[in-house]
Image (cartoon, rainbow, N blue to C red):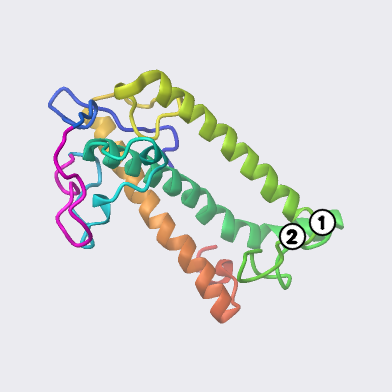
């Protein structure tokens, strides 16, 4: 998972019009089903898929103070949200089967309670088990850590202004910003995040319906 990767403009015009969004007085949100900016942004992973025109609506926090933000600002914030959800989903998609595999082994070895729901399934809203043992405190601790990371992102966003790039938390960059390698790596992160979001939803639903642990469905695991 390329957790440290973020978007960056290239010298060939990548993110042109997005890195420095501008205001205008034209109607910005034509409505659901209308063509949106998706497909013409130049963002990594943008294949133009927005059949309901959802990108036409500004539902981000910043819209509370600015009702006429340009679509460039809106698309930039939506990409930031997609990266955040994708990164969390990649972590969850890995942790879900791993904890089902390791928790029973570690519980038996160290003589501590098995905290899997029904001694087999990952704790979740549908599976139950979120209120047992240290699970609640672990969830709260993780939420606090995520909030601290988010606060860091907001500080960087405020400091960089129009030069801010979605998903940037000031972490180590593997490739130079603006390079072709960076663009490809950013696209890879976006697609891995999308796949992980679908995967973690599938894990939750299939376990709630079949009661079969996800770890038991992975042939090589």
Q: Mark 1 points at which residue?
A: 109
Residue 125 is a magenta residue: no
Residue in view at x 54 percent, y 80 percent: 209
Quadrant for residue 188, please give it.
top left
- Contact between marks 2 and 1 (CB within 8 A): the answer is yes
For the C terminus, the quadrant is: bottom right
- Above or below — where is 192 with respect to 69? below
Q: Name the residue under label 2.
A: 105
Q: Residue 51 carries which label?
A: none
User: In terms of secondary structure, what is the magenta stretch mainly?
Assistant: loop
- Above or below — where is 172 with respect to 212? above
Residue in view at x 71 percent, y 66 percent: 129
Residue 40 is a magenta residue: yes
Residue bounds of the magenta highlight: 24-41
For the N terminus, the quadrant is: top left
> How far across and how far down the image is residue 178, in percent?
24, 25
């Amino acid at each position: 998972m390329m957790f440290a990767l973020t978007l960056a403009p290239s010298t060939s015009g990548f993110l042109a019009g997005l890195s420095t969004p501008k205001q205008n007085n034209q109607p910005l949100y034509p409505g659901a089903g209308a063509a949106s900016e998706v497909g013409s942004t130049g963002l990594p992973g943008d294949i133009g898929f927005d059949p309901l025109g959802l990108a036409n609506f500004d539902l981000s926090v910043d819209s509370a103070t600015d009702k006429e933000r340009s679509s460039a600002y809106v698309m930039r914030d939506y990409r930031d949200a997609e990266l955040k959800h994708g990164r969390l989903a990649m972590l969850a998609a890995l942790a879900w089967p791993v904890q089902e595999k390791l928790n029973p082994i570690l519980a038996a070895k160290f003589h501590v309670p098995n905290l899997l729901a029904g001694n087999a399934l990952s704790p979740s809203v549908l599976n139950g088990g979120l209120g047992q043992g240290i699970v609640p405190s672990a969830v709260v601790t993780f939420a606090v850590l995520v909030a601290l990371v988010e606060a860091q992102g907001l500080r960087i966003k405020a400091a960089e202004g129009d030069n801010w790039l979605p998903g940037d938390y000031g972490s180590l960059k593997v490739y130079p910003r603006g390079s072709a390698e960076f663009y490809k790596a950013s696209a890879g992160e976006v697609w891995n995040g999308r796949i992980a979001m679908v995967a973690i939803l599938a894990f939750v639903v299939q376990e709630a319906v079949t009661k079969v642990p996800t770890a038991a469905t992975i042939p090589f695991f």
